[in-house]
Amino acid sequence: MHTLSSEERKVVNIKVIELNKGSRIHHVNAYIETNQITALIGENGAGKTTLLQVMASLLKPTSGRIEFEGAMKKDIRSYIGFLPQFPSFHEWMTGLEYLTHVGQLVGLKKQNAVRKATDLLTLVRLEESRGKRIESYSGGMKQRLGIAQSLVNNPKVLLLDEPVSALDPKARTEVMELLLTLKKDRTIIYSTHVLHDAEQVSDAYMLMHKGQLIETGSLHSKEEDYVLEIETAECERLEAELKTVYPKRCITRGLNHVEINITPTKVREDLMLLSILEKGGYSFDGIRKRKKTLEDIFQKAVTG
């Protein structure tokens, strides 16, 4: 079996972008690999929605460009599917009628549009509700219908803006499971505030802060960073000393513990920390090592 190189797997190329129209984003430079789910995370107002709208050709950047591999010589809008955070529907229609209507809008003949709509309703597990009016659908059902709508033109890249933010846990799980199914045939980029869900289904992340893309990474890295949690009553003193010894390391203080990022490839780093505790005469109740999470990455960005 042929293994794709990093260049062959590069499906979306985001060059340095600036946008100065109401919402400003700048210095965005990244690439996204094919058949992956990438979570776009960041605070409210960080620029996530704006970036997705630029990628969907709904906004034009002041400078820079978005490149979609395989779509260089045609309108990239035929290459992508986009779901806004708050999709709207003709709620008096049934799910089948609505998707058939969308299919005809993108150029399908009536018979083909009905067939496409039926297949998509089955894919998003709405086949039993295809004859019901959309106004009777739950929030989770409407979100899955919105995803089905974004798939009508058979896109290679799917852009979803906060697809699970307003859903209950059961509906969130259903949408996340759907994304895992969809990534087999396409690349998915979606924004989210639900970091735990993002970790469960995403292959990579893009972190935005104040309009800039400040970090990207894989969630399946072989050299994962870890967080060392040190429980102590002397949090303030320990935090100050660790920040002096490790000025470039992410160190945070909780109510009764201090956290520091460590990398397993660093030789005996955990033993060096134990030495600092002993030499400083710190009393501590325990030390726990855990994998670095998206929450850690997010907090590091927002707290600076």
Image (cartoon, rainbow, N blue to C red):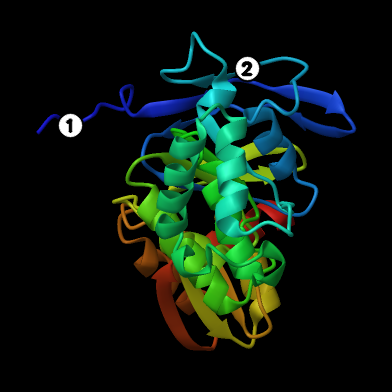
Residue positioned 56% across, 44% down in the render: 100
Residue positioned 90% across, 33% down in the render: 22
Q: Amino acid at mark 2?
A: Arg
Q: Position of residue 134 (x, y in %)?
A: 67, 63
The residue indicated by pointer 2 is: 65
Q: Amino acid at mark 1?
A: Thr
Q: Is residue 163 above or below residue 275?
A: above
Please tell me which of labels 2 and 1 falls first in the chain: 1
- Residue placed most toward the observer, 265 or 57: 57
Answer left or right for 248 relative to 134.
Answer: left
In this view, the residue farthest toward the bottom is 285
Answer left or right for 224 relative to 168.
Answer: left
The residue indicated by pointer 1 is: 3
Residue 292 seen in the current view: no
Q: Is residue 186 above or below residue 277?
A: above
Residue 178 seen in the current view: yes
